[in-house]
Image: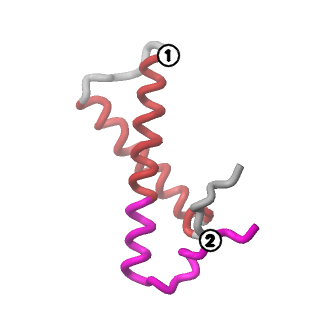
Amino acid sequence: MKDVMMTGLGRRWWFVGLLSGLSAFLTLPLLHAAGVGSPQNWAQWLVHFFCFFTVWRCLNFIGWFAVLLIAPGSKLLDPVKR
């Protein structure tokens, strides 16, 4: 199922690579600061997944908003064609 709000920016390989690297880089220190080190059971793995997904979505919004502010007429903001 496709994301309805997906734009051309979210389909670029370099943006997805940057998002995944930054999300992993920011998730680990965040979890260590919260007292969750390396996951040892399924509940901790679930917390890791939710934290990574939340950081991913926040960075995705920040990237989209930055493109919107810098170049509001960019083709990267157009919705994906079906």
Q: Is residue 16 left or right of residue 40?
A: right
The answer to whether 71 is drawn above or below residue 15 in the figure is: below
Residue toward you, 5 or 60 = 5
Residue 70, given in percent of the width and then of the height, sits at 38, 81
**Disc number placed over residue 71 in the picture, else none:** none
Residue type beneath disc 2: Pro
Quadrant of image for the C terminus: bottom right
| Residue occupying the far front of the picture | 4
Report the residue at 52% width, 63% height from top. 15
Query: In the displayed structure, would residue 62 be above or below residue 41?
Result: below
Q: Which residue is mark 1?
A: 42
Q: Specify the segment rendered in magenta.
A: 61-82
Residue shown at the point (39%, 53%) measured from the top left: 58
Quadrant of the image occupied by residue 29: top left
**Residue hosting label 2:** 79
Q: Residue furthest top?
A: 41
Q: Residue at x 34, y 44 (%)?
A: 26
